[in-house]
Image (spheres, rainbow, N blue to C red):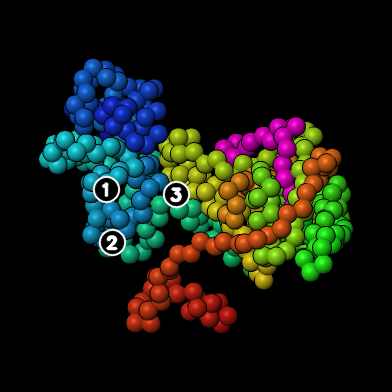
Amino acid sequence: MIRHAAPVENHHYVCYECCVARLLKDLVVRQGETATCSLCGATKVRCAGTGTDDFLLAIKALIRYHFGEWQYHSKLGDGSLEGLFSIDPNPLLRINPAQSDIDREDVILSFMSDVNDRQMQVEVITAYGRDIYGYYPHTPVSAGESHILQSARRKLADTNYFLVEDEYEAIIRPIVVYMSGTVSAGSKWHRARMGAKRRAADFHEIGAPPQYFFEPHKDKAIGAPPVGVATAGRVNRPGVSYLYLASNSETAAAEIRPHPGELVSVGMFEVNKDLRVVDLRTHDLTKLWRSDSQLEMLELIIAMEKIFATAAPPSNRSAYTLTQFLAEIFRRLGFDGVLFRSTVGDGDNLVAFNPAHADWVAGSSRAIGVARVRYDWSDVAMFDESETYDMDYEKQSKLLEQ
């Protein structure tokens, strides 16, 4: 049941400069009034009142976006909602080192006291009392842990994809307006292929190594593979030919995973019509924040970006089952391709569903040698046999096999 309460009189204000989150800055611009900022003390500046409905709703949406419930629900951990505003640097409101902790707390409490009683379109707490342990706590929306994609992955494990396409197309259709982008005709993109077409050598002096010359692949030889012989990729199913491109040649080469000492041909393709694409690089809290359902939509967009951007090793192409499934839904919804960030290069990837929508740029091909491949490492938490985990994937797998 949605509870409403009358807006309270504004006793505190925050100015544009003290708002870190773009969502709050936009509120100051759109709805602000001239006042004295309660955080930095600036006078006669445009501010947002902490007692307005939109300010409180924005605060709740920002908490959901940046923080997991374990960080602020006292019955799950040792944090609190008010404590989130003491984190430095703060993703919501700037911390003024000249302001006392007591004065800052007074400002925060002016709106946090209403966080569970007003603007119930967004809930920050899943449950209270004894009921709390029957619910999964909120994860940060920005983490992209979408239960919708988790459900789709489970269904695709034991159900033919065409039996569930309509179900997930209906889920994705309402959010395409927030993902729709355009790749303009005339824009140039890069593509790579292993090896070269021809090799020759010149011997300049006895005992010295020869100088090698290479003719790179070009035109159709560096384009999309023929229909029927295309192997499974991140976006295409086996036998389906899509054109994989990148925003720069380094990213294009990195995406095909060459090893040191190998040769790669790279060339450019020019888009020959405006392409309507799913642009997974853009997910904007300022457009999806006014309800739990909108935050869920934003979480889904972020989750889709994560899985498209994450490259699977060649030994595990089955990991692309979900991205191939989503790409087919995008195509059914009238898109010409999908655009997403690369995790192996510093550029972006564009996959055109129709290879004829881009033409090879004559004279653009060149051959490059791979001198070194670099990896970034990070330690992960170690499994402890003595611990009990919320999700033990080995146990879950055994249960599913029974």
Question: Against 136, is 40 above or below?
Answer: above
Position above or below: 289 against 266: above
Of callouts 2 and 1, the N-terminal one: 2
Examine the structure image and report whether residue 108 is included in the region drawn in magenta: no
Q: Which residue is mark 1?
A: 87
Q: In the picture shown, does residue 44 fall above or below 224?
A: above
Taking the image as drawn, is residue 164 in sight? no
Would you say residue 178 sits in the magenta stretch?
A: yes
Q: Amino acid at mark 3?
A: Ser
Amino acid type assigned to the residue bearing label 1 in the image: Ile
**In the rendered image, which residue does mark 2 sit on?**
76
The disc, 2 or 3, on the residue closer to the chain's N-terminal end is: 2
Residue in the picture at 48% in, 35% down: 287
Residue 63 x/y as whole percent: 34, 45
User: Which image quarter holds the N terminus?
Assistant: top left
Segment tinted magenta in the rendering? 176-192
Q: Nearer the viewer, residue 358 or 117?
A: 358
Asked whether residue 93 appears in the rendered view, the answer is yes
Q: Position of residue 317 (x, y in %)?
A: 68, 66
Residue holding disc 3? 142
Q: Say which of 108 and 203 sits in front.
A: 203
Q: Are marks 2 and 3 in contact (CB under 8 Å)?
A: no
